[in-house]
Structure formats: C-alpha cells, structure tokens
Image (cartoon, grey):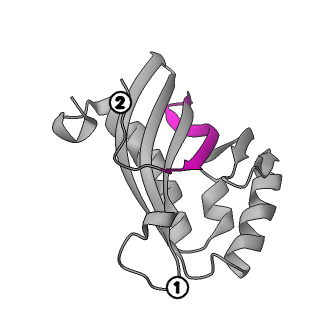
Amino acid sequence: MSVSDAVLTTEELAVRSAMDGVIAAWANNDANAFVDFYTDDATLVTVEGIYCKGRESIRSQMTMLYAGVFKGSKVFDELEDIRFINDDVAVAITWNAILLGGLTELPPEETRRATWVLSKHDGRWLVEAFQNVFITVPTMEVG
C-alpha cells in the first residue's frame, strides 16, 4: 500500500510537515528558511553529485541556485513511503520534480526520486540527509 492510500499517523504528519517546510522555503527561493529545516551537520547530495555538509554549505549552495538556474522555481513533491527506524529517526521516499520558470506541468526529464532522513530534536523533525536522483524509467517499480 502506498502512503497516498494510507491515513498518516501523527508522527508521519509531523515528518511530512518538516518536509513541506523545505518545499515552501524553496517556493519562496529562501535559502535561510530552507536550511532552518536541516540539522547543523546535515548533508545534501544533488542529482549532479554536488555534496554539501552542514547548514552553511547548504545555505551557500541554495543561495547560488536561487539566484541562478532555480530562480523562481517551485518543487512538486509527493510522499511515496515513510518508515521509522526508531521513535526519533525516519526515512522518507518522495517523487518530485523542479518546476522551472513558471512551468505548471511536470517535465518528464525533471522527475526525481528523493530519499530524506529526518530526526527529532526537542520535538521538532529536521532533515539529517537528503539525496535525489533522476528517474530514468518513471513507470518501473521494483519490490
């Protein structure tokens, strides 16, 4: 059963809320708000293989991207799977795409699958690690 078919628990909704905060910050092209949802030592790996470690590195990367290629872009993000490693650590898989320059349709060449690792800090879920990859055959599912 996919996440979209299930009723999310309170903790699943809290994890999703943190992820939605990242997506909302992206929609505003706000690198400061974006990193507010990441831990101090978080890691981010882009589809191009760029590796950022820590909030300041991620902030710098996102500031550059929002001023350039991703200026005015939005992200479509749909939760596909979520599981809890323990009460304070979750792994989520999403299907997403970057909508560049006011696009409203998802371009097939921009569809991605992302892995999010989140942990709870003083009751607040934050991103520990994020990585996404392009989907080369979007209709193929294994498992």
Q: How many angstroms separate mark 1 from mark 2 (CA)?
A: 34 Å
Q: Kindly identify the residue that appears in the image at 55 percent across and 66 percent down.
A: 26
Q: Is residue 79 above or below residue 28?
A: above
Q: Kindly identify the residue that appears in the image at 18 percent across and 33 percent down.
A: 6
Mark 1 and 2 residues: CB-CB less than 8 Å, in contact?
no
The span picked out in magenta is 119-136
Asked which quadrant contains residue 121, the reply is top right
Q: Kindly identify the residue that appears in the image at 43 percent across and 44 percent down.
A: 94
Whole-percent x and y of residue 57? 82, 54
Residue furthest bottom as drawn: 102
- Amino acid of disc 2: Glu
- Amino acid of disc 1: Gly
Residue identifier under label 1: 101
Q: Is residue 21 above or below residue 73?
A: above
Q: What label does residue 75 carry, if any? A: none
Residue identifier under label 2: 11
Label 1 packing within 10 angstroms: few (<14), some (14-19), many (20+): few
Where the N terminus falls, by quadrant? top left
Mark 1 and mark 2 lie on one chain; the one further toward the N terminus is 2
Q: Is residue 25 above or below residue 72?
A: above
Find numbered disc 1 in the image and state the secondary structure of the residue it sits on.
loop
Residue 128 vs residue 86: left or right? right
The one nearer the camera, 134 or 15, is 134
Label 2 packing within 10 angstroms: few (<14), some (14-19), many (20+): some
Where the C terminus falls, by quadrant? top left
**Is 135 included in the stretch rendered in magenta?**
yes
Whole-percent x and y of residue 19? 47, 48
Q: Is residue 85 above or below residue 43?
A: above
